[in-house]
Image: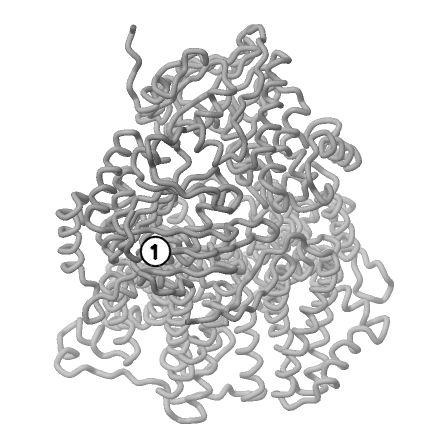
Amino acid sequence: MNETTPILALRGICKSFGAVHANRDVDLTLHKGDILGLLGENGAGKTTLMNILFGTYAADAGRIEVDGTPVTIDDSAAAIDCGIGMVHQHFHLVPSHNVIENLMVGQKGKYGLLDRAGAEARLAKIAEEYDLKLAPNALVGGLTVGEQQRLEIIKALFRGARILILDEPTAVLTPQETEGLFKAMRALTERGLGVIFISHKLFEVREITNRMMIMRQGAVTATLDNTPELTDRQLGELMCGHELTPPEKPAVEVGRVLLRLSNITAGGTPERPVLKDVSLEVRAGEILGLAGVSGNGQSQLAEVISGVLPPHGGQIEIDGEVLDRPSVKAVKARGIGRVPEDRMGTGLVTTLPLSDSMVLPRIDQPPFSRYGLVNRAAIRDFVKEQVERFQIKTAGVDVRTGTLSGGNLQKVLLARELAWDPLVLLVAQPTRGIDVGAGEFVHRQFLDLRARGRGLLVISEDLEELFTLSDRIAVIFEGRIMGIVPAAEATAQNVGLLMAGFQEDAA
Amino acid sequence: MRLRLEQREKSSPWLNLTLPLIAIAATLVLCGGLIALAGANVIEAYTVLFASTLDSKFNIVETIVKATPLVLTGLAVAVAFRAKFWNIGAEGQFLLGAMAAVFVGTQEGLPTWSLVPLMILCGILAGGLWAVLPAILKTRFKVDDVVTTLLLNFIVFYAMMALLDGPWKDPLSGYPDSPDILMDAEFPILLRATRLHLGALLAAVAAVFVWWLMRFTTLGFAIRAVGESPRAANYAGHNITKVIILTALISGGLAGLAGVGEAAGLHFQVMAGISTGYGYTGIVIAMLARLNPLGVVPSAIFFAIILTGAEAMSRSTGVPVFLADVIQGTALMTMLIALLFTSYRLRVSLTRHG
Amino acid sequence: MDEILAQVFQVGFFAAMIRIATPLLFATIGELYAERSGVLNLGIEGIMLLSAMTGFSAAYFSGSLWLGVCAALLTGVLAGALMGLLTVTFGLSQHVSGLGLTLLASGLAFFFYRVIFGQQSTPPNIVAFKPVAIPLLSDIPLIGPVLFNQYALVYWALLLVPLTAFILYRTPWGLHLRTVGESPHAADSAGVSVAKIRYQALMVSGALMSVGGAFLSMAQFNAFTFGVISGRGWICIALVVFGQWKPWRSAMAAFLFAFIDALQLRLQASAVIDVPYQVFLMMPYVLTIVTMALLSRNARVPAALLTPFRKEER
C-alpha cells in the first residue's frame, strides 16, 4: 500500500510447544493506517504469534522490528514501550477496580503517588479524540462486555499504543456492538495507528480490513490485499488447505420427540434468569443445531440439560417422561449423553489416568463396579476397546489424561458417551481447537448416530458447521430462542439476523 | 538468566520412589549443618539419633508405639488432602477422640466387654463429626477449610482445658489431669512386658483399609476425582458435597482413633500434653508419603525415629531436642520442592539481550 | 454489677487493651499485605516466634533493644523471601508451604534458643522497652494515659494502619499490589511483574509480623518463652478475614479482640463471674468461624488468593 518503513515487521518467527509447531517461519508487516486481518482456523497459530509479539511467549527463532529497528520483547512492559497494545480475547481487567484504577495499573505516578487527576485528564482526551467514552469511576465489574472491550482499547491508547492487536474481538459482541468497534477501528487508523485484527469470521475480515494474512498449521499460507475479486471459497481453501465439501447427509425418517424442554427459565437469579422461557424439541433421527453469539445462554442451556443446573421453572421431558427433579444422575440414567465444550474443565480430569477419565461418569454402575467395589480389570478392558475402536492416539491407558491432544481428548469424550448408546447426545463446540481430520471423524459419528434414530443437539458458534450438520437450526439470543429454521431454508442472512436479536417477520 | 518451570509430559515412576528419599537426604544434610552449629559431631549425633531407636527390641517397640498415633494422623491427612479437603484439624480431632475415649472409659456400669469397642467407636465418631463441621462450612458456605480446621483446633484445646480445669480436675492433686479410665477399658498389650498396645494393630489395619478404600471402592475413585477436578466430577454426576463430607468423616475418624489409642493404650487419661502436635506432624508424614496410605507407615516410622531419637541424641551430645521440629519443617519443604519435579522440570535459559 | 464494671473499665484496662492489640496490629497488617497480593502467609505463627527469639537474643547480647528489633526485622524479611521462593517461584501450594514455614521457623526458634542459652533454671531476661510519654498529649485526661504513654512500638503500630491504607489506595505500588491480588494477568499485561510485587509483599509481610513477635519478647514481656506467641499468629489470619481484607476494618478487629482478651484477664483476676476463662479464650475463634460463615456470601476475598501465577501456562 505504501513504500515507507513498516511500523511493525516480524521476520521468520518460530515457536513450538513440545512436539507442536505453533508458528513456523512467520513473516508479517504492518504499515501506518493498515488494518491487517489475520485469518486462520482455531489452532492455526494466530494467538501464539500475537502472544510472542506481546512478550507473553518467547519465540524460538526470528526477530521483531518496530519502525525498522530490531527490538527485544521479553515481557509485556517491553511491548508497551515499543508502542504495542493488545486486547486479549479474555479481558485483562480487574473487576473490583474502577475504570481509572484499571488505567493506572503499570503507570509510574507522580511524586510516588497515584496521579488520578492526570489520568482522568488523559482519559477525557482519548474520549474526545477517538469517540471512546467511559465514566472514570464506574466499577469495571458492572460494565457490559462491549464497554469492557472499549476500556481495553482505551487502556492500550492510554499507554501510548501505535500498534493495536485485537484478538477475536467480535466473538463476544453483538452485531451492533461490532459495528461500534469497527467505527472505532477506522477512527484509530485515520490517526495513524496500525491495527491487527484476528478473526476466523470471513465476512468481518472482508468488511473491515485492507490487507489480510492467512495462517494454517502455524505457517503463513498467503498475504493478500482485500479486493472484491477475492471469493469466500478461495479464502476458505487457503484457511483449510482443501476444498470444503460438506459430508453426505442421507435422509433419515424423523421419529418421536426424545427430548423436550418446555418454558425453561434458569441461571442468574429467579428474578433475572439467563434463560428465559426456552422451549425446544429434539426428535429421533435429527440433528438440532443451536446457533448464537457466545454468552447468550448456551452454556446454561447445556447445564440444564446435563442436570447440573436446576431450572427455576419449566419442564424437561426425556422420551415422554417428565423429570420431577432433574439431576446429573437422573438425566444420565434416561439416556442423555454429553460432550462438553470445556473438555479439560468439565469433561475430563487432566491429572488422572486416561482410564479413570474414561469411566468417570459410569464408575458407579456395572461392569465397572458392584456394591461400591471397583472392578479394575473391567475398566481396563473397556478403555482398551474404546482406544482401539476410536483410534485414540495414546501411549497407554495409564497415562495422564492431559497428555493427549485436543482431537484425541474429544474422541475420548465421544467414546465415553457412545459406548452407552445415548438416546440424545448433547454436544457443545464439537470441533473447536481440534484438527480438520479429527473434526471430520467427529462429524461422521454424529451422522451415524442420527442414522440410527438417535437425536442430537449441537451447540456451536461455527455457522459453517451447523449448516452442514443440522436438520433444523435454533437460534438463541440473550437467553431466548429467537426462532427455529429448517436447514433447507437457513442462510447466513436469516440466521445472522436472528443471532443479532431481530425476530423474523411473520411473512 | 531465567529460571522456568516446564510441565513434564509424564511423570516417571522412578522419580516417584526416589524423590522422598532425596528429600530426606537433603533434609538430613541441611540439619547436619545445625548440629555442627550446635557444636556437636554430625555423624555421631545422627548415629545416636537413629541407633538409639533401633538398637534393642525394647527401643524398636517404643518407636512403634510412638509411630502408632502418627500413622493414624498421617492417614487422616492423606485421605483429606486427596479430596483437596485441607484438614489441618487432625490435632483437634485427635483431642476429641481422646476425650471421648476417656469419657466412655470412666463410665462405671457398662458391661466390661463393651468398653474397648465403645471407646473406639465413640472416639472415631467424635473426631469424624468434628471434621464434618468444617466440611459443611466449606461445601455449603464456601468458607476456607484451612482456616476453619486450624481455628477449630484451638476451640477443642480450650474446651479440653476447661474440662480438665473443671469437672475432670483431680480433686486430690489439683493437677489438670482427667481421672484414669477403668482397668477394663485399657487397651490390651500385644507384647508382654512392653507398651505395645492394641492401637498399633489398629493403625496397621487402618493403613491397609485406607489403601483398599482409595484403590478398590467407588468412594475412593470419587474422592480422587473430586480432589483433582470438582467441576468434572460434578458434571459426571458425583455429589461433591457428599464426597467431601464422607472424606471428612473418614479423615476425622482416623485422627480420633489416634486419640483413642493414646488415651486408652498409653496414658489411660487425658492431660494437657497428650498431643505433642501429632495432628501437625501428620501433615508432614502424609506429604512425605505422597498421600499414599501404605507410604504413610514408613513415613510415620521415620518421624517416630526422629522424635524419640532426638531425645537420646540430646542427652548424649547436647544438641537441643528441638532438632526434631526443625527436621519436620525442613522435610516438608524439601519434599514439596521435590514433588514439584515429578510434574515439572526446571529449565535454566540464558536470554540474549540486544 | 456496676461495681464490676467500675472495677474493669479503668484507664489501666484501656491501656492494657492497646498493648495487647499492638502485636496483633503488626501481624494482621503484615498478613494483609501478603493476602492482598494473592498469597496466604500461613508462616505467620512461625515467623513471629522466630523473630521474637532473634530479637530477644540480639538485644540480650548487644544490650540495645533497637538492634534487637533490627535483628527481628531481618529474620522476618528472610522468612518472607523464603515463602516467596516456595509459593511464587516454585508455585507450590500456599497452604502447605505456609504450614511448613511455621513448622520450620518454630523449630529453629526453639533449637537456637537452646543452643544460645542452654538449659537454665531461671530464663534469661532483658530490660524491656519502657513506655515513652509524649509531652503534652500524655497529660490529656483519660486519652493521654491510654494512648500517649505507651511503648514506642505501640505508636508505630498505631501509625501503621493509616500508613497502610495510604499505601494501598494512594500509591502506584499499592495499586499494583491490589491488582496482582485480584488479577495477575491484568497486572502482567500492564507490564507489572507479578513475581516482584508478590516477593515484596511477602517481605513486607514478614517484616511486620517479626516486629509483632519482637514486641512480645521485648516490650510486653522481658524474656523469650516457648509459649510467647501461643496462637496469636493464627488469630491474625482470622482478623484479616474478619476485617474483610481492609486495613481499617482489620485494625478494628484487632482492637475488638484485644478488648475481649483484656476483659478476660480482668475477669479472671477479679474472679467475680463463674465462667471458665477458657471460654473467653475460645471466643475469638468461635466468633471468627461464625463471621466467616455469615460473610462468605459476599466476602471480598482477593480473587487471586491461593492461585500461583505462571506466565506460559496455557
> Would you say residue B279 is visible in this rendering?
yes
Residue at 36% across / 30% down in the picture? A229
Image: C271 above or below A367: below
Task: Give the structural element (helix, strand or loop) at label 1.
Answer: strand
* Residue at the outermost bottom position: C62
From the top left corner, tell me how far across and down residue B91 is, in percent.
58, 58
Return the x and y of residue B316 as percentages of the image width and height.
72, 86
Relative to B39, say whether A364 is above or below: above
Output the chain of dot 1: A
Residue C96 occupies quadrant: bottom right
Q: How is the image coloured?
A: one colour
- Judged left or right of residue C239, residue B202 is right
The part of the image, by quadrant, that contains residue A359 is: top right
**Which residue does the numbered mark 1 point to in the structure image?**
A8
Q: Is residue C102 visible?
A: no
For mark 1, does the 10 Å Cα neighbourhood hold few (<14), some (14 to 19), or many (20 or more) residues? many
Which residue is at the front of the view, C271 or A445? Answer: A445
Q: What amino acid is at disc 1?
A: Leu
Q: Residue at x 46, y 27 (%)?
A: A460
Q: Which residue lies at the image location 61% right of the left edge and 42% below the top edge?
A: A405
The residue at 25%/57% (across/down) is A159
Q: Judge by depth and name the residue closer to the eye, C183 or B158.
A: C183
Query: Residue A360: image x %, image y %?
Result: 64, 34
Q: How many marks?
A: 1
Assign the C terminus of chain A to one quadrant of the image.
top left
**Foreground residue among A390 and A305:** A390
Question: Can you say whether B289 is above or below A284 in the image?
Answer: below
Relative image position of residue B334 (x, y in whole percent): 62, 68
